[in-house]
Image (spheres, rainbow, N blue to C red):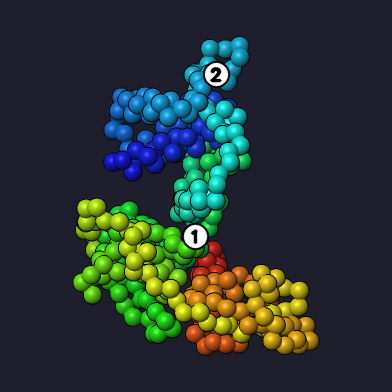
Amino acid sequence: MAVSRTERLLNLVICLLAATRYVNKEQIRQAVPQYAGCASDEAFERMFERDKDDLREMGIPLETGSNEVFFDDEIGYRIPKDAYALPPVAFDSEELAVLGVAARMWQHATLAGATARAIRKLESVGVDVDPEALAVIEPRVDAAEPAFAALWDSVQQRHRVRFHYSRGGAAAAPRRLQPWGLVSWHGRWYVVGHDDDRGETRVFRLSRIQGDVTADGPAGSVVVPDNVDITASVRMLAQPAPARTARLQVQSGRAVPLRRQGTVVSEEPGASVLDVPFEDAEQMASIVCGFGSAVTVLTPADLKDAVVRRLRTTLESISAASAGGAA
């Protein structure tokens, strides 16, 4: 219930902050998904009144007014951007690190998609919106691991999952997990939970999960132990990967970040051969794929396989989308 209320209040803030004019109650009811489940007008009115009080208690400047100057128009609501935005705030390095971890949640498509849907609903009921106004509540840090969305959903829904996991370059093996939470630790994402196969608490790095993460049981079937500290579990159980070296062929003038990290082994016409240190093959494959055809993996073999697998998955997704559009 607490999560649902928090999501509802956040959606209400997005709705009223993005609108360029006052938004009436009916438009708000259509734009905020959690209001759609109200059984009656009276139930919506009670919930909306409580939410307005909650926003004001939080110090969020909720304005009421009319869009018509000379007519007795219906009262609407909005959050003025200038009053909502914070003045410049200075943070020390430790505070910035904590904020950076928290900010990783927003950029992910699962959460950004909810915002986009709220904007589309506002537009569909005739409300002019200013997406740039949301910049004051939108930190932008990426969570790029393909397994993130499914695991995030499983943690929220409390259901078991199955996936294939590779460690230390070994072949991927099937795993069954009761997920308790996700943690970002030293720039990497981990899922913590009870490993049904091992019968103990385990930590899995998301970048080492191969293929799809699938549900393995009904929602609510996972019970998180009392007083569990998932961050402490990651700190204790997550083992750093041994340092390795990737030999890459990089086109001249391209992939500057890799050039900065690596050492030039030789120069070829139109390209350089670099040795670049890395720890995790899946994470390194994600970086390499980001440079497209500008970078070719020469060694090691498991890194080459990881790159090929990612490119093949992308190609299959594009083909499937094209086939669906044609149909």
Report x, y in % for residue 158.
27, 56
What element does badge 1 sit on?
loop
Residue at 70% x, 82% y: name it: 264
Q: How many marks?
A: 2
Report x, y in % for residue 157.
30, 54
Residue at 58% x, 71% y: name it: 287
Q: Quadrant of residue 196?
A: bottom left
**How many residues crowd around disc 1 within 10 Å: few (fewer than 14), some, or many (20 or more)?**
many
Residue 66, numbered label: 2
**How many residues crowd around disc 2 within 10 Å: few (fewer than 14), some, or many (20 or more)?**
some
Q: Eyeballing the image, is 65 above or below 227?
A: above
Please name the amino acid that badge 2 sits on.
Answer: Ser
Q: Eyeballing the image, is 277 above or below 317?
A: below
**Can the viewer see residue 309?**
no
Disc 1 designates what residue?
Answer: 143
What element does badge 2 sit on?
loop
Q: On the picture, is 20 further left or further right than 118? A: right
Report x, y in % for residue 217.
24, 63
